[in-house]
Amino acid sequence: MKVDLHSDSELRKIYDLKNIAVVGMSKNEEKAAHYVPKYLIQHGYNVIPVNPTISEIIGRKSYQSIADVQENIDIVDVFRKSEDVPVVVMDAIKKKGIK
């Protein structure tokens, strides 16, 4: 079994990361891609929807891709099929400033 080599203080720093781009965010309230970001919003996180099929969700502008997001992004949360993830990862790598 692997042991986590990060200290408690290092792990706590994750909670300071508040700007979360959610790729694949859904309008369908029954999907995790909707209720997880909604929960994050309710707990003080700035959720940035990324979904090319919708223009707005939960009162927030939705972006076509991570590259199109004008705000700072700390974390990218992905709700996509596994075969779609490599493209999202490459888009995130190209975006400057993602922690």
Image: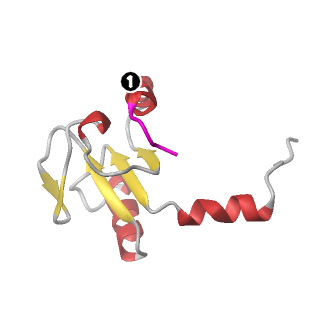
Vertical side of 87 occupied by 62: above or below: below
The picture places residue 42, in percent across and down from the top left corner, at 37, 76
**Rendered residue at 40%/58% (across/down):** 19
**Rendered residue at 37%/37% (across/down):** 80
Say what secondary structure mark 1 lies in. helix
* Left or right of 28 on screen, residue 56: left
Across the whole image, how many numbered discs are drawn on residues?
1
Vertical side of 7 occupied by 39: above or below: below
Residue 60 on the magenta span: no
The picture places residue 1, in percent across and down from the top left corner, at 88, 41
* Left or right of 55 on screen, residue 66: right
**Rendered residue at 26%/51% (across/down):** 26
The image quadrant of residue 18 is bottom left
What residue span does the magenta drawing correspond to? 95-99
Vertical side of 85 occupied by 72: above or below: below
Vertical side of 82 occupied by 46: above or below: below
The picture places residue 14, in percent across and down from the top left corner, at 60, 59
The picture places residue 87, in percent across and down from the top left corner, at 38, 24
* Left or right of 64 on screen, residue 11: right
Q: Which residue is disc 1 drawn over?
A: 87
Residue 98 on the magenta span: yes
Q: Residue furthest left?
A: 55
The image quadrant of residue 10 is bottom right
